[in-house]
Amino acid sequence: AALAERNAQLNLAHKAARVGSYSYDLTARSMRISRASAEAYGLPDGTIEVAGQQWCARVHRDDVQRLRTEHIRAFKERRRELVNEFRFVRPGGEIRWIEARSLVAYDDVGRAERMTGVYIDVTERRKSEDHKNLLIAELDHRVKNVLACVAAVAQRSRECSRSSDEFLEVLNGRISSLANAHALLSRSHWEGVELGELVRNELAPCTIEGSNLIVGPDIVLAAEATQPLSMVLHELATNATKYGALSTRRGRVSVCWKRQSSSHRPLTLEWCETGGPAIVAPGPSGYGSSVIRDLIPYELGGSVDYVLAPAGVRCRVEIPAKWLSNGLRRRTSRNDSARQAHAAL
């Protein structure tokens, strides 16, 4: 009775820890397993002995040869301990990651005759590691993109600057804009940025109270669209501050956007300057102008109509629907999640 009670406790411990013990006879090619292992690995209840061939048939086909090669190498090297990781396919197709920790016994002539050890279910750990590796790869990709963008901005800014002071001022503004867009994306966990927030963020450093009008529905830009649009807005705001409406106290900038009810229609954003000095005929196109005109079509497949009208700059930007989502629906789902979490607490 005492032995039965201890075995029951051991089985419960095995189930809780997702651990099973085993002993494999290499000569007879048969395996004895703990009762807890049967349930954990989808074997019939009460199974305590399994043929080696039957067990190997449950090992994922992509891992069978690797596992066999690791065993053969360990036996040739007369290793006493062996650790393997492989995928095990349960009935129904569920795949679990298993870590096997084994002690190997050899006969008098050095031939492996028995393996004894434990199987540990490490599926959750492997999923966590895979997720971490995915995040690292994504971070690496984003960092490379940002560095490439900064390098291109620095090169083009230097080419279009007439002095080192002008170069440093222009470069600092453009990098700060990139950093601000990145901060907005980071705050939203790279799910996207509300268009109104992005516009206000870009105009904030160069406007005074009452000098701008920002109007539009709740729209969320996809993460991939946020940086290109922020760069365009930065160049428009910079030009307005130096030469346009924001260079005088009477000047005014309005940024309005709309989207028709159809979810397949593009977003239309209009930048309009009034009350500033008359716009003179432009000289050769600089880097800022090329960003305004070319970046959205190149990066997002949209269109830009940039007009240097005498009464003030006008810029109409169209962004395809695939880069947009409904901001109200996004906030509502977050609020619902918050309420559910609060109710659970």
Image (spheres, rainbow, N blue to C red):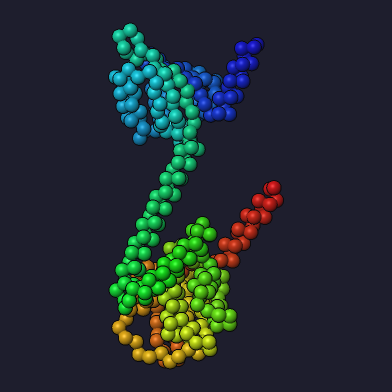
Which percent across, then down, holds residue 95? 45, 36
Task: Tell me where residue 12 sits by quadrant.
Answer: top right
Counting from the top left corner in percent of width and height, residue 338 is at: 64, 55
Give the total number of marks visible in the rendering: 0
Occupied quadrant, residue 113? top left
- In which quadrant of the rendered image does the N terminus lie? top right
Is any part of residue 323 visible from this angle? no
**Snapshot quadrant of residue 309:** bottom left
Question: In the picture shown, does residue 17 fall above or below 211?
Answer: above
78 vs 14, nearest the viewer: 78
Residue 242 location, x and y as percent? 43, 82
Query: Outermost residue, top direction?
Result: 108
With respect to residue 197, does 111 lie above or below? above
Q: Residue at x 44, y 43 (%)?
A: 130
Q: Residue at x 45, y 31 (%)?
A: 98
Q: Position of residue 277 (x, y in %)?
A: 45, 90
Q: Which residue is at the front of the view, 304 or 233?
A: 233
Q: Is residue 269 visible?
A: yes
The residue sitting at 36% across, 12% down in the picture is: 106
What residue sits 57% from the left and 62% below the top?
A: 330
Q: Is 74 rendered above or below residue 262?
A: above
Closer to us: 281 or 219: 281
